[in-house]
Amino acid sequence: MSLPKLADKETLQRLLASGKLTLAETAELQQSYDALVAGKELESPQRMMANTLYDKYKIGEERVQGGRRRGQSKLGELLAKFDAMPRPKRPPGK
């Protein structure tokens, strides 16, 4: 299952707040984050490194597993309620 694409700033914030990074990774990502906040865009190698570390440390796994897709669980809840309704024993009028 592919994870939804995150904005660069959100990806970097989650990585830095995770506490799973090494000192070298933290320093490099902090520089990238500071540059991003200053108004610069991430370069392709920086973005690729951030996405690789995000996948490596499975930062978004907790959020994805606990979340639900739009409309999917509502439909499931409605179907469960419908299945729980009492059913008639005979067709009406007989």
Image: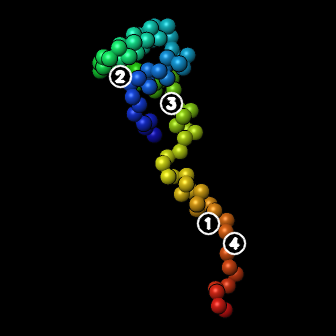
Q: Amino acid at mark 3?
A: Gly
Q: CA distance from mark 3 to mark 2?
A: 16 Å
Mark sitting on residue 82: 1
Q: Is residue 19 above or below residue 11?
A: above
Residue placed at 38% from the left, 16% from the top?
A: 37
Which tag is nearer the camera, tag 4 or tag 2?
4
Residue closest to the eye, 22 or 11: 11
Tell me the residue that label 2 is attached to: 48
Q: Amino acid at mark 1?
A: Phe
Tell me the residue that label 4 is attached to: 86
Asked whether the beta carbons under mark 4 and mark 1 sit within 8 Å of each other, the answer is no
Q: CA distance from mark 3 to mark 1?
A: 34 Å
Label 2: which secondary element? helix
* Residue 46 on image: x %, y %: 34, 17
Residue placed at 44% from the left, 36% from the top?
A: 3
Location of the N terminus by quadrant is: top left
Residue placed at 58% from the left, 60% from the top?
A: 78
Q: Amino acid at mark 2?
A: Met
Label 1: which secondary element? helix
User: Badge 3: few (under 14), some or many (20 or more) residues near its Cα, within 10 Å?
Assistant: some
Label 3: which secondary element? loop
User: Badge 2: few (under 14), some or many (20 or more) residues near its Cα, within 10 Å?
Assistant: few
